[in-house]
Image (tube, grey):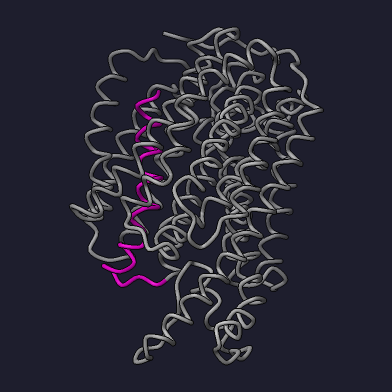
């Protein structure tokens, strides 16, 4: 299972490092580069719960293997793409295969380990995420800098081959023996609701949160979601049995995962632009800057599983969220010339804060679900993470852009430049919010330096506000943990393993 997640996590971290180079070499716009990430997330979020159900029905090992093979092949296709359109299309397809892989991995862990050992198993699985996260920025930085951006996708091919061989040998098949069909109407309604939700979140910064298109997609989410919930009470074999949420810990764990991903992914989205744009670091140096966080997860995840097994989920998760809030607060104080130590300390704290939350929330959702719904529960956990990450990126992105637009004129005048007009600010704010300095050609060096400084200081103001909001969300999540109960596992039919 760890080999599979290593492949997915390597992909996620190296793509973040490679994005600036992909934009330059393929002549991609900022919106197109956003779709390199957003297209993947959209496909992943829409298909996760359905993919979990496919595993419950046809076998988690079989679905896991298809996911690994498809992920590796689409990675190869992405690396061979000659234009940004093809690259985005293959990233969407890669997201579909990633959706097959991740819930099946959690379901196989759930079937293989008894309840008293599941925390530790998920902790080790989380450590594998830390290993791949630690390797990703550095490997990605070396490959982008010394080889090319295509190589960051090609690296998934040998990892996928190893995972296939090992998986075929050691994984035992598991599936729900009582299930016999797929709730296709449920698939259609849920996919439509998830698509509308994630699309609205992704496009809201472009459309405007009060725009009619954003409101229309939000309304479609509510209507399709309500129809899906109604149909699940009528379907003979529902896609997502609503009885799963009778266990309060499953519901709270889902909300916790959304808030955690909101805080983490939303805030971390801007770090690459801070390091490579404002700080002027190479991709490799940017990867090294993020090493304390990734390496910290390697160390923190297994003990987090042990602590949750001994103390229950409440104290470790609440403590983790408070540590995360402290880390976000420290990141909100970063200066334009922040040294390695200035980021290393909050990054290490972030790793030790997030580890018990990720392990605990995953165990709460998957561990409290009946075994025959473990694939669906795994899909629910991953869906919550993707929705939370997309929501965090969109909301915090909008906050950063609004803050940049507000402070940009003041920073221009402070640098001895004429204040830009409202129209000029509107043209510049998006570029500045991504760490770029919109310098017109042909200006003298003094003016170039003044515009660059004003732009970078405006970006920092926006980023600081984004981290402050993330810290507040982390505190809210810590308060929510008060309502978590260990609960009893929901009873259900047995699962066929063998």
Residue in front for this viewpoint, 157 or 433: 433
> Is 6 contained in the magenta span?
yes
Residue at 31%, 72% in the rendered image: 27
Q: Does residue 316 appear left or right of residue 485 in this picture?
A: left
Residue at 38%, 91% in the rendered image: 443
- Whether 186 is drawn above or below 459: the answer is above
Residue in front for this viewpoint, 489 or 456: 456
* Residue 97 drawn at (x, y percent): 39, 40
Q: Main secondary structure of the magenta part?
A: helix
Residue in front for this viewpoint, 421 or 446: 446
Q: Does residue 2 appear left or right of residue 390 in this picture?
A: left
* Residue 322 drawn at (x, y percent): 70, 35
- Whether 55 is drawn above or below 415: the answer is above
Q: Quadrant of the N terminus?
A: top left
- Whether 457 is drawn above or below 257: the answer is below
Residue at 60%, 9% in the rendered image: 115
Q: From where the camera sits, is residue 347 visible?
A: yes
The boundaries of the magenta stretch are 1-29
Q: Quadrant of the C terminus?
A: top left
* Residue 171 drawn at (x, y percent): 36, 15
* Residue 333 drawn at (x, y percent): 61, 54
Residue at 73%, 54% in the rendered image: 223
Q: Does residue 129 appear left or right of residue 163 in this picture?
A: right
């Amino acid at each position: 299972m760890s080999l599979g997640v290593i492949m997915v996590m390597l992909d996620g971290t190296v793509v973040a490092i490679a994005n600036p180079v992909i934009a330059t070499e393929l002549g991609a716009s900022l919106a197109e580069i956003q779709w390199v990430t957003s297209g993947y997330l959209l496909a992943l979020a829409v298909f996760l719960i359905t993919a979990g159900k496919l595993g419950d029905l046809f076998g988690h090992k079989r679905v896991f293997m298809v996911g690994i093979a498809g992920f590796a092949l689409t990675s190869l296709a992405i690396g061979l793409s000659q234009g940004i359109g093809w690259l985005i299309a293959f990233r969407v397809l890669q997201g579909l295969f990633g959706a097959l892989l991740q819930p099946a991995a959690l379901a196989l862990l759930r079937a293989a380990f008894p309840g008293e050992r599941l925390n530790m198993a998920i902790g080790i699985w989380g450590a594998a995420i830390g290993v791949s996260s630690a390797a990703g920025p550095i490997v990605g930085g070396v490959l982008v800098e010394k080889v090319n951006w295509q190589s960051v996708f090609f690296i998934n091919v040998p990892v996928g081959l190893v995972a296939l061989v090992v998986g075929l040998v050691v994984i035992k098949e598991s599936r729900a023996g009582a299930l016999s069909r797929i709730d296709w109407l449920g698939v259609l309604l849920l996919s439509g609701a998830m698509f509308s939700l994630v699309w609205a979140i992704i496009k809201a910064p472009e459309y405007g949160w009060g725009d009619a298109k954003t409101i229309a997609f939000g309304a479609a989410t509510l209507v399709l979601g309500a129809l899906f919930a109604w149909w699940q009470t009528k379907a003979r074999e529902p896609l997502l049995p609503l009885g799963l949420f009778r266990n309060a810990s499953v519901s709270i764990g889902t909300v916790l995962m959304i808030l955690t991903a909101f805080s983490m992914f939303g805030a971390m989205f801007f770090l690459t632009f801070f390091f490579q744009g404002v700080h002027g670091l190479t991709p490799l140096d940017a990867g090294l800057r993020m090493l304390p966080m990734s390496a910290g997860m390697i160390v923190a995840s297994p003990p987090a599983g042990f602590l949750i097994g001994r103390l229950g989920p409440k104290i470790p998760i609440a403590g983790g969220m408070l540590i995360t809030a402290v880390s976000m607060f420290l990141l909100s104080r970063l200066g334009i010339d922040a040294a390695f130590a200035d980021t290393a300390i909050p990054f290490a704290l972030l790793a030790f804060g997030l580890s018990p939350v990720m392990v605990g929330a995953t165990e709460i959702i998957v561990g409290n679900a009946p075994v025959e719904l473990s694939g669906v529960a795994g899909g629910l956990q991953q869906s919550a993470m993707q929705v939370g990450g997309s929501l965090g990126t969109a909301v915090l992105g909008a906050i950063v852009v609004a803050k940049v637009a507000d402070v940009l004129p003041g920073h221009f005048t402070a640098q001895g430049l004429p204040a830009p007009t409202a129209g000029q600010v509107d043209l510049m704010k998006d570029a500045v919010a991504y760490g770029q300095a919109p310098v017109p050609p042909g200006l003298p060096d003094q003016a170039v330096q003044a515009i660059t400084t004003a732009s970078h200081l405006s970006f920092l103001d926006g980023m600081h506000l984004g981290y402050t909001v993330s810290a507040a969300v982390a505190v809210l999540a810590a308060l929510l943990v008060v309502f978590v109960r260990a609960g009893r596992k929901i009873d259900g039919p047995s699962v066929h393993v063998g």
